[in-house]
Image: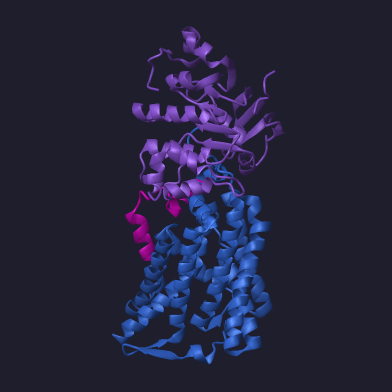
Chain colours: A blue, B purple
Amino acid sequence: MDTLVLLTLTGLGLGALYFLIASGLALIFGLMDVLNFAHGAFLTVSVYAAWRTAETVGGMPGLLLAAVVGTLTGLLLAAVVELVLIRRLYGRVKEQILVTVGLSLAVPALVQTVWGADARPFPVPDALSGTVGVLGARVPVNRFLLIAVALLVLAGIHLFLSRTRYGLIVRAGVEDRAMVTALGIDVTRAFTLVFALGGALAGLAGVLGGLYFGSLSPHQGTSLLVFAFVVVIIGGLVPITSVALSALTVGLVQQYANYYAGGYGDLAVVVLLAAVVLSRPAAGTGSPLTRLRRALTTPRTRSAGGTA
Amino acid sequence: MTAPPILRVEGLDVDIAGSRILTGVTFDVPASGVTALLGRNGVGKTTTIRAVLGLLPDGGRVTAGRVTFAGDDITHEPTHRTVRRGIGYAPEDRGVFAGLTVAENLALAERPGHEHRYDLVHDLFPELAARRDQRAGTLSGGQQQMVALARTLLNDNTLVVVDEPTKGLAPRVVTEAAEVLERAAERVPLLLVEQNLAVVRRLARSAVVLDAGRVVHTGDARDLLADTARTTALLGVGSRPDHGAA
């Protein structure tokens, strides 16, 4: 029983981490069909910036400042990448993939040159390094922190999407971007905002990942990104709650399989992915895979539907 | 002394994926009344409208010619800027956001810094007020068309472009749509793509006929429709007065 509790809360914590990464990916892809392989690189740079801050300041204030620095680093990096690179490549899916894959390879390599390939310990304040007893299990405190932050982010994204004009533009743009422009709205501005917010969430995820794993390494972002992609494919792009549910499912399956199936957690996630993809061969036109296939095989129409 | 046209299309050539779709398309949309853009299926009516609005598909581009709106060149302008000049657009498939409510669909059309004519919209479409919290994807085709038209009338536009508003609608709903368009046309000039000639006869003052990507006729709409032989030659259909509901 206590093992199950520990596994469940750890799985939920991991799922929370996946959600922070996957929610940005889903919104970015949903709005502009941009498959952002650089999302993990944002996380990596952010967690190193956070680590330097936490080391320098120390203790709980250091961690709080590190969270701010990490989030802002992700935000700024994403905004710069969007404005300088992605913006020139709207509608050119293959070129975008090349650019973001390039970043996903170059950035960790650069980080590795500066700080080395070895994992470094992430400073965890005493208040967060302990455990809490839940139904007989000793659960690390940081799991609860991760779950709480993810819930706050979920509520925040929900409010942003449902209550703000930019949120309305994002929801409409995910359905039919061209029609949004035909109503006189500059979708690219909303996209820059979403891209930067996605980067901020990746940065925050980096800091929480540092707490969760207790360490950081140049390829942390890339390996987390793989699972975030799986989350998006399973959960779809909208609504954001389905991304959250999918993230929790992936986190739990991974943890349970790691314990009960002899360390095959990653494999179990791949099997889950395959099962989901194969069980809905005629995925709806809004599914990420269908959209990607269409974007890659046909020149993307910017037009508002209908025929010529 | 006639007023200058609100929209002028001059010598427009459009290529899509390397094929010439429009050749030297030239016509004016007067600053009042309804101008009908007519022609058989696939002659380039929708492409013409999309070229005007900058909504051509990727691989599509204007290779020659000029579009001016209220005297300003808008040929290669981004769509959102063109639209903000005062154009309302209801596309062929209505372009309604299925996952958004009716109220949200209308709110998206609001242009910040302008007055919004919810009074007019709810007067024309009382049903939309009643269904404001309903998801647009669950509306009937006719109701979705109301949303699309309401969005074009919410702002004080100086031109409204409507692509096949009666396509796929039941005869009774076609009549309703025609009534709304007639009332809208009292306020704002309309550029209307329409296959239903009864609707055209009822609404249109001038007509532009396309064939194989070229303008083959411009002139008074009623004169054209009165000439059965010419209508049949140009549009491939008869124009009996009882053709279709309006």
Res. A267 visible in picture: no
Principal SS element in the magenta part?
A: helix
Range drawn in magenta: A271-295
Residue at image coords 55%, 47% = B110
Q: Where's residue A113, x and y in %?
A: 68, 75
Q: Is residue A234 magenta?
A: no
Left or right, A5 with respect to B82, comes to left
State whether residue B237 is above or below residue A119.
above
State whether residue A304 is above or below residue A102.
above
Res. B191 visible in picture: yes
Q: Residue A119 is drawn in which quadrant?
A: bottom right
The tally of labels here is 0
Q: Where's residue A11, x and y in %?
A: 39, 76
Q: Where's residue A148, x and y in %?
A: 45, 77
Say which of B53 and B139 sits in front: B139
Residue at image coords 54%, 80% = A210
Left or right, A11 with respect to A93, comes to left
Q: Residue B12 is drawn in which quadrant?
A: top right
| Quadrant of the drawing holding the N terminus of chain B | top right
Residue at image coords 43%, 81% = A144
Left or right, B64 with respect to A262, comes to right
Q: Is residue A291 magenta?
A: yes
Q: Where's residue B22, x and y in %?
A: 60, 26
| Quadrant of the drawing holding the C terminus of chain B | top left
Residue at image coords 46%, 63% = A158
